[in-house]
Image: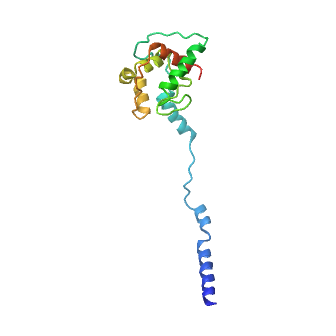
Amino acid sequence: MSKFNSLILVLVFILISCGGQEKKQEEGFSYKRTATPTTESKTETKLASNIINLTDKGVGPIKSLTLSDKIDSKMVAHGKEVYDKMCVACHRSDKKFIGSAPKNILKRRTPEWVMNMILNPEEMLKVNPLAKDLLKEFDGTPMINQGLTEDDARAVLEYFRTL
């Protein structure tokens, strides 16, 4: 019986010593943090991928490009095929991955800039301030020249218009 009483006494002691800790935690330091939306939104707008620049045409073979109001579905199909084959290793259409997301890219960049980045990424990353900032944002991962023709790059651009 004395072992049984001792066991009960030890259990009661453990329960008593453990009790009340919840109250101590409530009264003491709280480690719960809440995000401040203003800080996050300021950081978001500073990202190069969010900067809107509709005047920079970049550096490369494309000096001027006028887009039709009508989207060319045949060109879109070809552009999607090229994008799926050559671009998805680093890009996701609607979210950041290794590279930036092309969704709504033409709301942030000129068509010439986009095509020059596709066709001439090495030179763009060396001299274009926006491309340099993007390189920093994406941890120094450069866009690789995929050797696309101007027709392929134009088709990819047309595909981007549908995202």
What's the colour scheme? Answer: rainbow
- Residue reaching furthest to the bottom: 1
Determine the residue positioned at 41% across, 12% down. Answer: 61
51 and 155: which is toward the camera:
155
**Percent position of residue 108, x then y:** 52, 22
The image quarter in which residue 124 lies: top left
**Percent position of residue 77, x then y:** 57, 18
97 and 111: which is toward the camera:
97
Query: Looking at the image, how many numbered discs can be counted on the residues?
Result: 0
The image quarter in which residue 78 lies: top right
**Percent position of residue 107, x then y:** 55, 21
79 and 106: which is toward the camera:
79
Determine the residue positioned at 44% across, 28% down. Answer: 134
Left or right, residue 65 beside residue 144: right
As displayed, is residue 38 above or below residue 103? below
Residue 108 appears in the figure: no
As displayed, is residue 102 above or below residue 73? below
Residue 67 appears in the figure: yes
Left or right, residue 6 beside residue 119: right
* Placement of the N terminus among the 4 image quadrants: bottom right
**Percent position of residue 90, x then y:** 47, 31
As displayed, is residue 108 above or below residue 39? above
The image quarter in which residue 137 lies: top left
* Placement of the C terminus among the 4 image quadrants: top right
Determine the residue positioned at 41% across, 29% down. Answer: 135
Left or right, residue 126 beside residue 35: left
